[in-house]
């Protein structure tokens, strides 16, 4: 292990790590750039359309512009194969996608939805495509630039930057629109997006692997071959699917539970979720990442996975207790705190599983596989609540978390090996 990597394995504060490793600051700013466009093609754009009285059926169709985020793995191999603008595979891809995002936001700011809603829809689709593409390259850049001891903290800071960006392009953008108008608001977001370009230009390119794909067909098939040739590939794939499954299962109906099941007002839920909950999630992600520097990946996955599973039982307790503001705060803070820690460990796992030759493709595929199960758990969740009630439902979501913990215990040796530095161009 290099001296630089070794000094981070000793107990160190988050502040010390940030001072010693400027790549962590760059990761945080680039995470902000990665999260900023999401609401601007989603919730904030819907608010703009609703504000100018666009038909609700048309607004509903606009939800389809989010498809690129789901399908981004299809073009991820392009970013493993090609280096753009002479800046390298990662910096070149980031600059190209960030310039596309700035241009899309500026052109959107010139549109009148009432006169040309179709044009605005196509621009929003382009914005989402460029944003999803930026996510591909950013995930690859972060994975390649962070050495194993820094992955957990890097994942936590990514979560922080991304959430702050969503607050900026969500809540703050709505406030700005009310005072300066939608056109100026989108121009302000374009200026903030341009900061990502500057950070990218002044960031170092990760060391290119000696055996990066030389043909596009290699970038398509070799990532799959590389992953499935590793020991315990099937078990790791199952862990990717299952690690956040119980957490996501409970989250599918958590807001409906708080409003319909317990009887809190929408305002009460909003204050706790958007205020205390977000603060707890940010704190959990950063603290979880810092603890991973001391514990290593295996212990963090196990402890954080157990804690995020137990928080589901807090909602079962709330269902039994009934409307209690104190219990509401405990349940939401527990869920967000340990959920944030679990997310940091999970992102670190995905980074560790990537082969540096195919980081963009493999990370995009892992993310798609992890999201796949969450797409299908909504309908059965509603039927379970109708048949058994809320306490039983949240108990079932706790039980659904246990297979992942068993897999972590089973994969102990293999996960510990992921904490070792990889050779460039060699699968871990």
Image (cartoon, grey):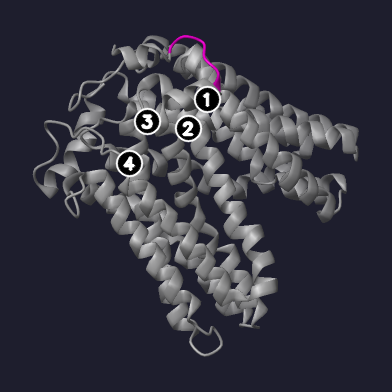
Earlier in the chain: of badge 4 and badge 2, it is 2
Residue at image coords 64%, 26%: 309
Earlier in the chain: of badge 1 and badge 4, it is 4
Instruction: Tell me which segment is drawn in magenta.
Output: 9-14
Which residue is tagged 4? 203
* Residue 215 against residue 395 in the figure, above or below: below
Which residue is tagged 3? 351
Which residue is tagged 2? 155
Q: Are marks 3 and 4 in contact (CB under 8 Å)?
A: no
Instruction: Looking at this view, name the residue that lies furthest to the left.
Output: 214
Residue at image coords 17%, 32%: 209
- Left or right: residue 82 versus residue 379 is left
Q: In the image, which is nearer the foreground, mark 4 or mark 2?
A: 4
Q: In the image, which is nearer the foreground, mark 3 or mark 4?
A: 4
Residue 155 image point, x, y percent: 47, 32
Residue 235 image point, x, y percent: 38, 23
Q: How far apart, in angstroms, are the residues tagged by discs 1 and 4? A: 22 Å
Earlier in the chain: of badge 3 and badge 4, it is 4
């Amino acid at each position: 292990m290099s001296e630089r990597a070794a000094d981070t394995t000793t107990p160190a504060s988050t502040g010390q790590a940030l001072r010693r490793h400027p790549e962590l600051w760059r990761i945080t700013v680039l995470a902000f750039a990665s999260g900023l466009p999401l609401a601007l093609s989603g919730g904030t754009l819907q608010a703009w359309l609703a504000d100018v009285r666009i038909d609700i059926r048309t607004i509903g169709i606009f939800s389809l512009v989010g498809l690129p985020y789901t399908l981004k793995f299809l073009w991820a191999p392009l970013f493993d194969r090609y280096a753009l603008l002479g800046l390298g595979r990662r910096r070149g891809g980031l600059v190209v996608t960030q310039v596309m995002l700035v241009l899309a936001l500026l052109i959107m700011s010139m549109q009148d939805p009432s006169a040309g809603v179709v044009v605005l829809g196509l621009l929003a689709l382009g914005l989402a495509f460029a944003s999803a593409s930026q996510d591909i390259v950013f995930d690859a850049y972060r994975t390649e630039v962070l050495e194993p001891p820094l992955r957990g903290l890097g994942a936590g800071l990514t979560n922080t930057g991304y959430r702050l960006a969503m607050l900026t392009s969500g809540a703050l953008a709505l406030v700005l629109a009310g005072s300066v108008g939608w056109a100026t608001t989108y121009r302000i977001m374009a200026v903030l997006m341009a900061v990502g370009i500057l950070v990218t230009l002044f960031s170092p390119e990760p060391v290119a692997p000696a055996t990066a794909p030389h043909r596009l067909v290699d970038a398509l098939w070799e990532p799959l071959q590389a992953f499935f040739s590793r020991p315990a590939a099937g078990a790791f794939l199952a862990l990717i699917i299952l690690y956040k499954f119980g957490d996501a299962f409970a989250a599918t109906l958590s807001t409906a539970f708080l409003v319909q099941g317990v009887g809190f007002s929408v305002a009460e839920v909003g204050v706790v979720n958007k205020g205390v909950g977000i603060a707890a999630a940010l704190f959990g992600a950063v603290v979880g990442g810092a603890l991973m520097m001391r514990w290593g990946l295996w212990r963090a996955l196990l402890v954080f996975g157990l804690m995020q599973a137990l928080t589901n039982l807090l909602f079962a307790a709330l269902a039994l207790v009934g409307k209690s503001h104190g219990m509401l705060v405990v349940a939401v803070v527990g869920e967000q705190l340990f959920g944030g820690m679990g997310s940091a460990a999970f992102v670190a796992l995905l980074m560790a599983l990537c082969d540096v030759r195919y980081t963009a493709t493999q990370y995009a595929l892992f993310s798609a596989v992890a999201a796949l199960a969450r797409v299908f758990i909504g309908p059965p969740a509603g039927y379970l609540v109708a048949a058994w009630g809320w306490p039983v439902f949240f108990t079932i979501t706790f039980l659904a978390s246990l297979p992942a913990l068993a897999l972590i215990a089973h994969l102990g040796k293999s996960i510990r090996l992921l904490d070792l530095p990889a050779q460039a161009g060699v699968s871990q």
